[in-house]
Image (spheres, helix red, strand yellow):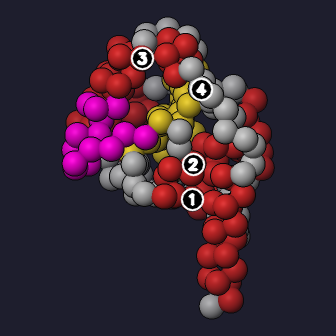
Amino acid sequence: MLGNIGKSLFTKFLIWSSRFEKPAEVINYRSIVGQTKRVLIYIPDSASEQRVQYIQERVKNCFPDAHLEYVLVERFPSDNRNFLQSSVPQNHLNIVKKDDIGFWGILRKNILENWKDKQFDLVLDFSSTFDVSLAHAFRASGAPIIAGLFLGRESELFHNLLIKTRDHELFDPTLFDCLSQLR
């Protein structure tokens, strides 16, 4: 019980501190998206094979010359993981295991440093739920643009390109339409 209270308090601290980590900068979205060379893409475990294919095709069309890396969680369905592994080089696939998340809900330091060293220009979060561990990791990656679904105050604190739709089904095409307009 004390562990859960501690984690809850630490999560609230992460949300609070990330908001004040550095002053808000003016972001030239058009310039950054237009010159994107490295993209980190989070595909949630709830994604169907059709959605995974759709995301892959649209990202490749939107950023044909960019280096693409994917993030999956360990519980990602094996059929979808096999499909993704067959179409993506192994070193472009990051699988986050339960052991990679520390007691306080933060990804291990070596993973965060690895992502920061890769200097991603854009993070695409396709999740329809908020996960503070991944949101914190995406923020820690140093990417100037972190795009995701508007889910409320928490997503507003960690993402800086928010897509608000009337239902989750419209998120993917709306995000890609937005990115295409920014290019």
Q: Residue at x 37, y 39 (%)?
A: 163
Whole-Å distance between the Cαs marked 4 and 2? 15 Å
Whole-Å distance between the Cαs marked 1 and 3? 27 Å
Asked if the residue at tag 2 contacts the one at tag 1, i.e. Cβ–Cβ closer than 8 Å, the answer is yes
Locate residue 179, reporting x and y percent. Answer: 39, 22
Residue type marked 2: Phe
Magenta residues span 162-175
- Label located before the other in sequence (1 or 2): 1
Q: Which residue is mark 2?
A: 158
- Could you say which quadrant of the image residue 75 lies in? bottom left
Q: Which residue is mark 3?
A: 182
Q: Which residue is mark 1?
A: 132
Q: Residue at x 64, y 43 (%)?
A: 139
Vertical comparison of 162 with 121: above or below: below
Locate residue 174, reporting x and y percent. Answer: 28, 32
The kind of secondary structure element at disc 1 is: helix
Residue type marked 1: Val
Q: Report whether residue 134 is seen.
A: no
Q: Residue at x 60, y 43 (%)?
A: 138
The kind of secondary structure element at disc 2 is: helix
Residue type marked 4: Ile
Q: Nearer the viewer, residue 30 or 68?
A: 30
Name the mark on residue 27: 4
Q: Nearer the viewer, residue 80 or 34?
A: 34
Locate residue 57, reporting x and y percent. Answer: 32, 21
Mark 4 or 2: the one toward you: 4
